[in-house]
Amino acid sequence: MIETMKITFTENELKKYTNWTLSALLEENGIRIPLPCGGGGTCGKCKVLVCFKTEDNSFDREVLACRTKVSDLLHIYQNSGATSLCIIYETKSAAMTGETSFYKPEDTSGVLCSSMAEGARALSCSNGPSYNSSGKLYAAIDLGSTTIAIELFRENGEVIHTWSAENPQRLYGNDVLSRIRAASESTITRSDLQRLAESKIQEGLAVLTKDSVINPRQLTPDKFLQGLCIAANTTMGHLLTGEDVSPLGHAPFSPGNIGLEEISSVFFLPSEDTPPVYRLPGISAFVGGDIVSGIYALDMDLSPHWTLLLDLGTNGEMALARRFGDVLTIYCTSTAAGPAFEAANISCGCAGVPGAITKVSINDKGHCRPVLIPENDTAPCDPLASNSRTAQPDPSAFFSMQQKLQKAMARPVGLCGSGLISAVACLYREGLLDSTATFVSEHHRRNGFPLWQIPGQPPLLLLQEDIRQLQMAKAAIRAGITCLLKAAGITEEDLAQVYLAGGFGKGLDPLEAAAIGLLPVEVLPITSAVGNAALAGAKKFLLQRDELRLKQIQSHATEISLGDSPLFQEQYLKEMDLPALRLAEGIFSD
């Protein structure tokens, strides 16, 4: 649901904050407005309505909170003879933004295996509370740019609970560059970014503690946990420990301290029984501990065959690895894919929460038929999907559930990342987009394509600009893959396995990804989603404490710089277009 927040100021109150931005003023008064673009004024998602009230009437102005100075409002206030000013901000509730935590153990044992052939195998895990009065418990943490995930498990690897929530640092921008800029401009902001991450992790640990011990009032995380391990990209790791991140924002992009670190002081007061807290090592400023953790979890550093790991998030990190005899070779890179895969800069975008559109098809009448994420699942599978490899439920039952779900909702929450790719693949396949991903219809180019509409309510529209955002993101990823393969002197046919990591990778349909050119068609038979590989690596380290392997991964990794690469620029422009339509159609007909 939509929540409306109002706050009123007088002239004297406004004068105290003359040089502040409107977003800073609202934050000072307890209203935090998300700034997905980091306050650059480009995303338009911090719009607020400013109402001026005079003795005779009232009038309003819609402004961007991140770019509007209080002095600008004060000027209007004084010249209009206003007596008060009211700021109105509408926001989605927690249920719509994914703020609420949820218990849904994601088994990471499928990526904690000794051979690459078993990399995507899923093993059963414990569901619901599992009380523990003795025995050793550990916590693995994935501190992602978008989401923070924690897994609580026993020393035998059995998962007790997992917890997940949106990273509150998104208030300062959806991507790491926005947060680097914000933290570099103000030490107060840097401290707040540290506090936001640390307190959210503490919140998750507290929730897990409450539901996993017999007497939670007498036990806190530092009293019953035997160890914690955090996987994070370089920026998130540095922000967590309060380090200066400004060197990450300009050449030569010095990464600072990226070794394996013990950081228990960030969370706990020093004592004899304080559990160790490890931050996994990174490789460079933009290839961090989350990728090292994924390589380690998937045993890519032990495989005699070339394997490729893709973390399809905002930073677009990827790694290519092989061990030939005693020689370990790792190539890695990071592309500025932007937040399109997480739908953060999409006009109708939202997180992958219940009620979000995750798959799109077109019916015989040319109308969109969206598939929504149900309340009890964060990664639903359409039983009619051509790439499903499991036993299928009755399709009529599935669509009956979908009809009930859509009927119960006033409208879908929005379009999540996997839904965006599905929509573009579907529209292209149906001939509604040309090879440049431009709407064929002038009406759709101007007004957008309705993903959902019912009489009497505004439709949920996919705009041309939304598709352009996806084009840039997928072109960056595909060009990055090409550069890694070129550095290793191999082609797609030489790959033995391609891993799609992260929450987005888990919900992605590889067929649809190939249909829009995000993935090469040649790798479809060897592509598998492995879930949260970063979390799995953090868990594996706590169980095995194999520091030597982590150091070898770090020391043998060669980063491929894409910023000044002519090949990357050439491939990026080439990959902006969609594949030949006959190829896209053939993918789904095979």
Image: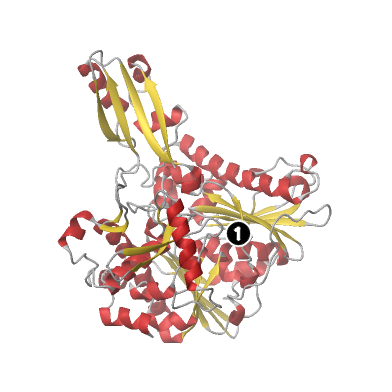
Residue 580: percent from left, percent from top: 26, 79
| Residue 537 at least partly seen | yes
Residue 198: percent from left, percent from top: 59, 44
Determine whether the residue tagged by mark 1 lies in a helix, strand or loop.
loop
* Residue tagged 1: 280
Q: Residue furthest right?
A: 134
Residue 101: percent from left, percent from top: 58, 49
Q: On screen, 589 above or below 124?
A: below
- Taking depth in this image into account, of 88 and 320 the one nearest to the observer is 88
Q: Residue furthest left?
A: 442
Q: On screen, 285 above or below 528?
A: above
Disc 1 residue type? Leu
| Residue 315 at least partly seen | no
The quadrant of the rendering that contains the C terminus is bottom left
- Taking depth in this image into account, of 154 and 363 the one nearest to the observer is 363
Corner quadrant of residue 55: top left
Number of numbered discs on residues: 1
The quadrant of the rendering that contains the N terminus is top left
- Taking depth in this image into account, of 553 and 193 the one nearest to the observer is 193
Left or right relative to 239: residue 173: left
Q: Residue at x 61, y 70 (%)?
A: 297
Residue 121: percent from left, percent from top: 61, 76
Left or right relative to 124: residue 572: left
Left or right relative to 502: residue 38: left
Q: Residue at x 77, y 46 (%)?
A: 223
